[in-house]
Image: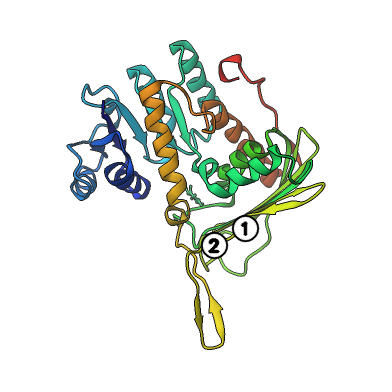
Amino acid sequence: MTVRIAIIGAGLMGADHAKIVAEDLPGASLQVICDMDADRARKVADAYSAHDVDSGPDRVAARPDVDAVIIASPDFTHAPLSLSCIRAGKRALCEKPLSQSSNECLQIMKAEEAAGSKFIMLGFMRRFDQSYVEMKRALAHGAIGRPLMMHNFHRNVATPASDFTGAMAITNSAPHEFDVVRHVLDTEYVSISAFQPKRSDALVAPVYMVLETADDQLVNIEINNNAAYGYDVRAELVGEKATIAMNAVNYTRVDRELGQSTSYEADWRGRYAEAYRRQNRAFVRFVETGVFPHIASSSWDGYCAARVAEAGVRALNDGRKIPVEMIAKPEFYA
Ligand code: ISE
């Protein structure tokens, strides 16, 4: 059976998912591109030969010709659209964050529990990136001993919108690190502190966070949304016996005029191209089998990321360390 996929949101990520579904996703077909802006939907649909277009995001999940949904619309629509997918009994790959409100995440968890099955796979694609896979494996095999610290840098060329704020660095960009680090370390955070240096211009300055984990480890995260030079993500995991660091991903380098250079991607779509493809293949298998992929983020993980982000924004605003308090993990997500 071919999984007929509808994509909600025909912006940057919606178009990227459309390309992946159309060109790189065995067992799936691009059924519908949905966007409230009908012209935008039509453009993406034509570019990747989708069967149909729709301009009603709320009704797409219930269409009989749709088996599964990819939610790639603006952040604030993720929770209500996830709920509409659960109601329609359709599995969804929802771009991060699940919601910026942990209460909304709880509603989604309740809806899944009531439906008796997981429906939402969250698009924290970094879990599928080979570098984090190898870090997790190194830990599992005892290659670096007990983990003590994880250093993380997350740099964008420029903010996606001119009204981007330091708080948004925490709620929109940092959730990637919040999620993948707790996944690699297999632990939860207990506190977060957040700091910001001052820039000489009006652009958003980097946000620097320090988190403590329940296993007495330290995690630091630099989110620099205006790094200017390229899309650059780095991480190093420090263990008691050794460390494991991510290499920059480059297939080529240029040697020229007594120098050597490599280049950066402009954004995450290139850097994580393979991770997105692995993630989306795992999603198709989830739709086919009903078995939630063990590596993927669930609604519970979305809730955890939202709780940390909420505490992080308070830490930044109040200028002090804030405890990260979460409900106990429900048996349903164990
Ligand atoms: C964007 O939404 C992403 O998810 C990117 O991976 C991240 O680098 C960027 O900062 C976010 O705005």
Disc 1 packing (10 Å; few <14; some 14–19; many ≥20)? many
Percent of width and height locating residue 284: 37, 31
Taking the image as drawn, is residue 170 in sight? no
Q: Amino acid at mark 1?
A: Pro
Q: Is residue 199 visible?
A: yes
Front-most of 263 and 64? 263
User: CB atoms at circles 1 and 2 under 8 Å apart?
Assistant: yes
Q: Residue furthest bottom?
A: 257
Q: Quadrant of the C terminus?
A: top right
Which residue is rendered at x = 49% and y = 29% of the image? Answer: 293
**Left or right side of 290 for 129:** right
Residue placed under numbered mark 1 in the picture = 206
Density class for disc 2 (Cα within 10 Å; few <14, some 14-19, many ≥20) is some
Q: Considering the numbered disc 1 on the image, is that residue within a helix, a strand or a loop? A: loop
Give how far across and how far down residue 24 sits, in percent: 32, 45
Q: Amino acid at mark 2?
A: Asn
Q: Quadrant of residue 88?
A: top left
Image x and y of residue 12, in percent = 36, 50
Q: Residue at x 44, y 49 (%)?
A: 274
Alpha carbons under labels 1 and 2: distance apart = 7 Å
The first of marks 1 and 2 along the sequence is 1
